[in-house]
Amino acid sequence: MGVGGRAGGSRPRWRWAAVVLGCALALVAGCTPDASGLSGLPPGNPDESTTTTVHLADRTALLYVPAKSPAGVPASLVVALHGYTADAAGVVDFLGLRPLADSRGFLVLAPQGTTDREGHTFWNAARACCNFTGSTVDDSEFLSRLIAGVTSAYGIDSTRVYLVGHSNGGFMAHRFACDHPDQVGAIASIAGALDVDATCEPAKPVSVLQVHGDADETIAYDGGQINGRSYTSADQTVARWRQIDGCRTESHPATRLDADADVKGDDLKPTSWTDCGAGTRVALWTIAGGRHNPTLTPAFTTALYDWFEAGGRR
């Protein structure tokens, strides 16, 4: 059904010391912090950008560590979640994250979903999308353990862990924020949603950005159903999070940009809600004329990361 897809400030200094100390004999094969259960983590090389496959039990993820560890504060981490039928490598390319990671100095973690009986990759995120074959996999717990391990190993600032997912990955980003708000400062869902009847009662506020094309032919901007299971519209999605976060002030920023190269002109229309709990924000970025698989521009990726950095929980 095609629910998947193709798919500013000072730069931080990695805290390699703890990793190198615990892995001094594992420079070739990578190290495994005992507490996390992760294997394949590189000890860190500030002179060379690396993409490594890390392992957690029988699951994998790609980890991108940019070159040149700059001085300053601990690093941030962007976790990228692929769509239905897509994969980890594809979502990093779809979002255009590597060039920005090199210039801003953040790590990129792209976990790999599991494969259903029909051979399609998916996240068990919501009843609507996209566990279509009755898998019992707990992706929320997998992501929690993975993020905890990477955050600990690289001295990541826990308030600057950001999730961004496309389609089924967008559903999963919402699910993770509901389940593990203590592990993430902000999330962005691109063409994702929530179950209409989803239970979401996070113990902490989470900044949430919903990005959605109003011409999306797969996950409809105005909401809909998949296999009889209803999902929220873009407006309903942000309304749910505004209620959860206790937001009070609505604004319509004047800034516009060309988010989708397939749509002519400055197509992104932002709406924001502030005065939310713990300094969080909620926003809806509508891509006028945007479809399910936008060709995202570098300007969009930069704006997304800037929004994370400005709007995460404090």
Image: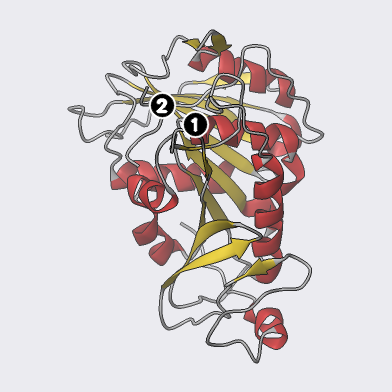
Q: Residue at x 52, y 13 (%)?
A: 235
Q: Which secondary structure, mark 2?
A: loop
Q: Quarter of the image holding residue 270? A: top left
| Amino acid marked by disc 1 | Asn
Q: Nearer the viewer, residue 271 or 88?
A: 88
| Amino acid marked by disc 2 | Val
Q: Specify which label sits upstream in the sequence, 2 or 1.
A: 2
Residue on which disc 2 sits:
3
Q: Marks 2 and 1: CB-CB under 8 Å?
A: yes
Q: Quarter of the image holding residue 32? A: bottom right
Question: Is there any visible trace of residue 198 in the rendered image?
Answer: yes
Q: Residue at x 41, y 26 (%)?
A: 3
Residue on which disc 1 sits:
168
Please state the horizontal and vertical placement of residue 99, each as a whole percent of the image.
34, 60
Name the quarter where the N terminus is drawn. Answer: top left
Question: Is there any visible trace of residue 208 in the rendered image?
Answer: no
> Which residue appears farthest toward the bottom when viewing the image?
25
Q: Which secondary structure, mark 1?
A: helix
Please state the horizontal and vertical placement of residue 65, each as a whole percent of the image.
48, 69
Please state the horizontal and vertical placement of residue 245, each as a whole percent of the image.
72, 26
Q: Residues within 10 Å of mark 2 (few under 14, many from 20)?
A: many
The label shown at residue 61 is none
Question: Seen in the image, is 17 located left or right of residue 49?
Answer: right
Please state the horizontal and vertical placement of residue 11, each as a whole percent of the image.
51, 67
Height in image: 184 above or below 177?
A: below
> Which residue appears farthest toward the left when viewing the image?
264
Height in image: 236 above or below 208?
A: above
Q: CA distance from mark 2 to mark 1?
A: 7 Å
Q: Residue at x 33, y 30 (%)?
A: 256
Q: Residue at x 37, y 31 (%)?
A: 255
